[in-house]
């Protein structure tokens, strides 16, 4: 098959969807499919390039309202790519998916859209804009697709409630490659590392974790929080760290390489993800695959998949989060059990060997006999 993957952001931009699209595209290419990626030129890099077997085509996006790149020129690229068997667009909230739906309408291409999870805003204006968008343009975009992928049953229920035809929705989870070896960062004796891998956005709840670290540090003087990721909340997080006197406790690493991320997973004692909204976080799968315990928030996408293999806490409650982190750090047996059970879960359900077959089968159903 000739497959066109459409995504707002791609390498070198860092994020869960970007990594999902790259891993999926690599696996499809390894199976003999011809894969091209249409994306934006954010951050600015080569417009057209090859990455292994993948062809990458990038388009300018002069505006990014609410972090959503407006790449009007991508429509021309979509309409010129009429020889693809499947156009697979990622993120139901992305303007690039709206363009893929328009191109599907104009060019009659076979369109699949992957939904990567709900959004959550605290700003009343942004909440209102999201509600209007989901009931209008997003719904029209999803209705135009011949198949819609959701990450969980709870996401499927939300899409059905909006008005998407349930017969077109397939639940296919995220996936990862199992690590072949685990490397570890050098750390001081008795140092305990709490890892958070996330974009620094308000809906990711990193402020809750920074607040929680005050109490964690009082209980565990050798505890360090390592935050990996970039985003619009970085300045505020640095301010919070300074106000609480936690400059030596909390480290914001920003964007790091894959090798450095692998070392961070190896060094950490647990992963914490304090989000208000998620689809199915790849970082949880990656931590569990390395036998690491996970503390995350009790929200639909996480609860559905990880309620028995992670410790879940209410979002936005720093005291409850700190209490839970300390509980896990105090209990070596609990950490070991969570790590073992998480690893078994990932091996049985969430590897690319399993998930890519489900996606290819869906493509073939869309193409028909």
Image (spheres, rainbow, N blue to C red):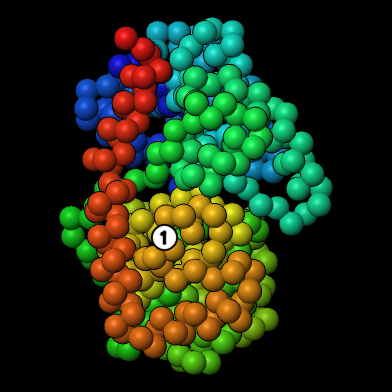
* Residue 310 shown left or right of residue 67 in the figure: left
For the N terminus, give its image quadrant.
top left
SS label for mark 1: helix
Residue 249, position as x, y percentages in the image: 50, 82
Q: Which residue is mark 1?
A: 306
Confirm whether residue 346 shows in the render.
Answer: yes
Q: In front: 69, or 1? A: 1
Dot 1: within a 10 Å radius of its alpha carbon, few (fewer than 14), some, or many (20 or more) residues?
Answer: many
Residue 334, position as x, y percentages in the image: 33, 80
Confirm whether residue 228 shows in the render.
Answer: no
Residue under the image location 27 percent in, 32 percent down: 357
The quadrant holding residue 61 is top right
Note whether 10 is above or below 49 in the view shown: below
Residue under the image location 69 percent in, 43 percent down: 66
Q: In front: 222, or 138? A: 138
Note whether 365 is above or below 202 in the view shown: above
The quadrant holding residue 226 is bottom left
Residue 132, position as x, y percentages in the image: 76, 36
Residue under the image location 22 percent in, 23 percent down: 32
Residue 260, position as x, y percentages in the image: 33, 60
- Residue furthest left as drawn: 180
Note whether 4 is above or below 43 in the view shown: above
Q: In front: 15, or 177? A: 177
* Residue 158 shown left or right of residue 186 in the figure: right
């Amino acid at each position: 098959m000739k497959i066109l993957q459409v995504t707002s952001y791609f390498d070198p931009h860092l994020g869960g969807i970007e990594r999902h699209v790259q891993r999926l595209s690599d696996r499809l290419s390894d199976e003999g499919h011809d894969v091209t990626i249409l994306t934006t030129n954010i951050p600015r890099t080569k417009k057209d390039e090859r990455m292994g077997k993948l062809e990458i085509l990038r388009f300018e996006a002069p505006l990014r309202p609410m972090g959503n790149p407006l790449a009007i020129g991508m429509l021309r690229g979509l309409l010129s790519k009429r020889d693809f068997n499947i156009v697979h667009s990622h993120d139901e909230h992305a303007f690039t998916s709206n363009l893929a739906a328009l191109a599907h309408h104009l060019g009659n291409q076979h369109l699949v859209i992957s939904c990567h999870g709900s959004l959550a805003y605290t700003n009343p204006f942004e909440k209102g804009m999201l509600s209007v968008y989901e009931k209008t343009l997003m719904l029209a975009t999803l209705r135009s697709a011949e198949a819609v992928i959701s990450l969980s049953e709870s996401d499927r229920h939300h899409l059905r409630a909006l008005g998407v035809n349930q017969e077109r929705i397939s639940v296919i989870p995220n996936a990862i490659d199992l690590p072949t070896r685990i490397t570890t960062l050098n750390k001081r004796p008795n140092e305990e590392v709490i890892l958070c891998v996330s974009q620094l956005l308000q809906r990711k709840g990193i402020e809750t974790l920074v607040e929680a670290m005050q109490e964690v540090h009082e209980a565990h003087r050798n505890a360090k929080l390592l935050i990996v990721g970039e985003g619009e909340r970085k300045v505020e997080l640095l301010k919070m760290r300074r106000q609480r006197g936690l400059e030596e406790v909390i480290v914001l690493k920003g964007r790091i390489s894959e090798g450095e991320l692998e070392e961070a997973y190896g060094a950490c004692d647990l992963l914490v993800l304090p989000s208000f909204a998620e689809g199915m976080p790849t970082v949880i799968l990656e931590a569990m695959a390395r036998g690491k315990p996970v503390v995350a928030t009790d929200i639909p996408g996480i609860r559905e998949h990880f309620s028995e293999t992670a410790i879940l806490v209410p979002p936005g409650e720093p005291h409850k989060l700190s209490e839970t982190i300390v509980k896990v750090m105090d209990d070596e047996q609990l950490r070991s059990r969570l790590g073992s059970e998480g690893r078994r879960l990932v091996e049985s359900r969430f590897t690319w060997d399993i998930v890519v077959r489900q996606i290819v089968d869906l493509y073939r159903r869309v193409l028909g006999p």
